Image: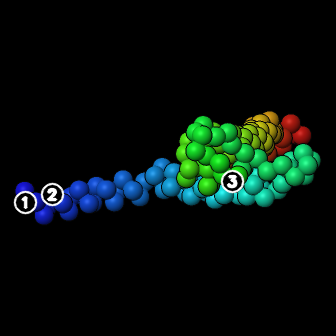
Amino acid sequence: MSVEDKGMRMLKEFREFAMKGNVVDLAVGVIIGAAFGAIVNSLVGDVIMPLIGAATGGLDFSNHFIPLSKAVDATNLADAKKQGAVLAWGSFLTLTINFIIIAFVLFLVIRLMNQLKRRQEAAPATPPKPSAEVELLTEIRDLLKKS
């Protein structure tokens, strides 16, 4: 078998693998997850943290840090990181709030899906329609009872 044949066979196997439902579903899930993450980051950074900052007197957590080096004298996190080691606890707090919101929203979605699934399982199933033979036999039985 030539190298070209091996390459073509491997390409064919990869195409079959990539087109399987699970791989495509996973790719769609990753893309939706990334978009959802961007929405949550915006929700936290643009809505929740400013509200928390307003409630705490204009406090912006994302720029809070503790300098770990005497060379750090900057007042914002980006400049402080350039000057030396810092403990960026405000950024950590923002990411922690992001995680809590994502986890809570996922909890609500999964809870809703489970409730819908339980309702579908609990709904009485309509009995299947009897076959033509059974209907005919039932009619004959009913006619015999009448006579």
Q: Nearer the viewer, mark 2 or mark 3?
A: 3
Quadrant the N terminus occupies: bottom left
Local SS, label 1? loop
Between residues 88 and 133, which one lies in front from this camera angle?
A: 88
Q: Position of residue 127 (x, y in %)?
A: 76, 41
Residue 136 is left or right of residue 12, and the answer is: right
Question: Do callouts 2 and 3 mark residues in contact (Cβ within 8 Å)?
Answer: no
Q: Nearer the viewer, mark 1 or mark 3?
A: 3
Residue 100 is left or right of residue 87, and the answer is: right
Q: Residue at x 23, y 56 (%)?
A: 10
Question: Do callouts 1 and 3 mark residues in contact (Cβ within 8 Å)?
Answer: no
Q: Is residue 139 visible?
A: yes
* Residue 76: image tag: 3
Within 10 angstroms of label 1, few (less than 14), some, or many (20 or more) residues? few
Mark 1–mark 2 Cα distance, whole angstroms, equals 6 Å
Q: Position of residue 75 (x, y in %)?
A: 70, 52
Between residues 46 and 120, which one lies in front from this camera angle?
A: 46
Question: Do callouts 1 and 2 mark residues in contact (Cβ within 8 Å)?
Answer: yes
- Mark 1 or mark 3, earlier in chain: 1
Mark 1–mark 3 Cα distance, whole angstroms, equals 61 Å
Mark 2–mark 3 Cα distance, whole angstroms, equals 57 Å
Identify the residue under disc 2. Answer: 6
Between residues 46 and 67, which one lies in front from this camera angle?
A: 67
> Which picture quadrant has residue 7?
bottom left
Q: Residue at x 61, y 46 (%)?
A: 72
Identify the residue under disc 1. Answer: 2
Identified by mark 1, the residue type is Ser
* Residue 36: image tag: none
Q: Is residue 99 visible?
A: no
Q: Residue at x 15, y 57 (%)?
A: 6
Q: Position of residue 89 (x, y in %)?
A: 68, 39
